[in-house]
Image: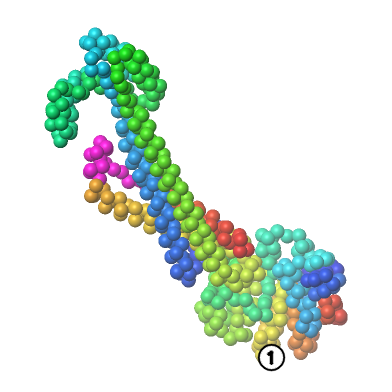
Amino acid sequence: MIEAIRVSKAYRPGVYALHDLSFSVEKGEFVFLTGPSGAGKSTLLRMLLRADVPTAGDIIVGGRNLGRMSTAQVQAYRRTVGFVFQDFKLIARKTVFDNVALIPRLVGINEFQVRRKVQQALNEVNLAERQQAYPMELSGGEQQRVAIARALVTDPAILLADEPTGNLDPVLSLEVMSLFRSINARGTTVLIATHDRALIRHLARRVISLEHGRIAEAS
Amino acid sequence: MKALLKFSFGEALSGLRRGWRTSAVALVTTVAAVFVAATAVLVSTNVTGIIQRLGAAAELTVFLDARATPEQRARVDAILARSPIVLSRTFISPDEAMRRFAADVPDLASLTQSLGENALPPSFEVQLRPGDEHEQAARDLTGVLSATGVVSDVRYDREVIGRLLTGLTLMQSAGAVLASVLAIAALLTISSVLRLSYQTRRDEIAIMYLVGAPPRAIRGPIVMEGVLQAAGGAILALVGLAAAFAWFTQRYGHIVADAFGLSAVTFLPWTVLLLIVLLSAFIGGLAGLGASWRER
C-alpha cells in the first residue's frame, strides 16, 4: 500500500531530515511511526501527503509514485488519503458540519449524499450533536474528532495522522486511539506519527522508529 | 460545476462582506472607469448619428463671379444638370441671397444696406445624391466647375463633415484613452484587493490544499469575487449614467434634437449595456484569476 524506497530529504546540502529510508506498509496495517522530536516523522508524513517531495528516492502509494504528479493529480491523491493534523486545521468560520462536508461538496456529490456521509462520519466520532457548532466552541478533543471525521468522510484507503494526541490529555488520547483502531478494523490502513510511548505500548501494533532521519528500529 | 459555482459564489459574498472597505474602493474605481467608458460610447453613438444625418444631406454651393453673364450661368447650370451625382439645383440670385441673409442675421442687415450695392454673389445650391461613393465624383465636379472661369468658389459640405469626423475620431480616441487608463486603474485596484482577500484567507486556503480541494475550488471564490466586484461596479455605473442621461434629456434633449434634426437623443441599447456588464465581469474574473495565480 505504502512503499518508501531509499527516500532522502535534505533541506541543506549534507543536512538530512530523512536519510536513505526504506520501508513498506501493507494494506489494512496499523503502524506507529515514532521517534524523538526532529527524527523526521512529520517530514515523512508531509511527503506521504505530497506536501513535500524527497530529494532522492521514491514514495509509492497505492501504485502511484508521488514524485510524478501534476497539481491537479496531487489534489486528487490527497482526497484519497485521510490526514489528521496535530493542530486540527479546521476552518474557524465554518461549522463542524461544513468543515466535514467541504470536500464532498467540492467534488460535486449531491447534497443528500453529502448529508448522509457527514452524519455517518460525525456519528462515528460521537459529534453528531455538535454539528452546528463552530470549532472555537469545541474542546481540543472535540476539534480533533472533527478533524478525524473530515478525514473519514471521503472513505480513504489510508489514514495518516501526525501527533493526533499531541494536544490532548491521556484520557482523550486513548479515546482518539480507540477511534483509529476501529477505523483500522474496517480495513483502512492507518499510519500514525507519535512520540507517546505509553500509547504505542497500549495498542501493541507495528512500530517504525526513526532517529536522525533513519530507521532506528522496526518491529 | 454547479457545486463549484455555488461554493465560489457563497465564499465570494462572504469575502466581500469581510473586506467591505477594500471592496468599496475597488467598486468606486470600477464605477468611475465604466462610467467614463460608457459616456464616451453614448456621446460617440449620438454624434455619429448626427454626422451621418448631415453626411446624407451633403450639398455643394457654387458661387459665381458677380459679373457672370446669363450665358455663363447657363453653362454652369448645364454642367450641373449633366452630373449624375446632382439630385437637384437651385439658382440663388444676389437679391435672394440678400433676403436670406437679412432673415438669418437681422442684426447685420442694416450694415449690408449701408454699403449701397449688393455685395453678395449669385450662386447655385446643389443637393447631391446621398452616399459615400460619390465623394470622388463630387471633387471632380468641383474641378470642372472651377475650370469654367466664372465660378469664384465651390463650398463642399463633405469637407466640413470630414473635419467634424476628424473631431469625433479625436474625441473618441481621447475617450478611449481615458477609459483605458481608468480601466487599468480599476483592474489593478481589483487585483490588489483580491490579493489582499487571498492573503486574509491564506490559512483557509492552505487547509483546503492539504485536504485535497480541487485547484479550481481554491481559485473559484477569488475569480467570483472579481466578477462580482466588476459586474456590480459596471451596473452601478450604468444606472448612474442612465440617471444622468434622463436628467440631461429632460433639460436639453429637445434643444440638441432640434439643432441637429434628430428625432431624439438616444441612450445606449440594452445589448450594448449587457455587453459592457459582461465585459466588465470578464475583466474582473481575469483580475481574480491573476491574483489567485500569483499568490498560489
Between B276 and A65, which is closer to the camera in this rendering?
Answer: B276
The quadrant of the rendering that contains the N terminus of chain A is bottom right
Q: Is residue A73 left or right of residue B204?
A: right
Q: Which residue is mark 1?
A: A170
Q: Where in the figure is residue A146, as x and y percent of width and height?
A: 60, 78
Vertical relation: A158 (above or below) A137: above
The quadrant of the rendering that contains the C terminus of chain A is bottom right
Count of number-bearing discs: 1
Task: Give yes or no for residue B257 being in the magenta stretch.
Answer: yes
Q: Is residue A131 visible?
A: no
Vertical relation: A192 (above or below) B155: below
Q: Secondary structure at mark 1?
A: helix
- What's under tag 1, amino acid-wise? Pro
Question: Residue at coordinates 42% horizontally, 53% vertically from top-left?
Answer: B34
Between B109 and A203, which is closer to the camera in this rendering?
Answer: B109
Between B96 and B211, which is closer to the camera in this rendering?
Answer: B96
User: Which residues lie in the magenta part?
Assistant: B253-275
Q: Where in the figure is residue B266, as x and y percent of width and height?
A: 31, 43
Question: Residue at coordinates 56% horizontally, 67% vertically from top-left?
Answer: B198
Q: Is residue A35 left or right of residue B268?
A: right
Task: Give yes or no for residue B111 being in the magenta stretch.
Answer: no
Q: Assign the magenta stretch its main secondary structure.
A: helix
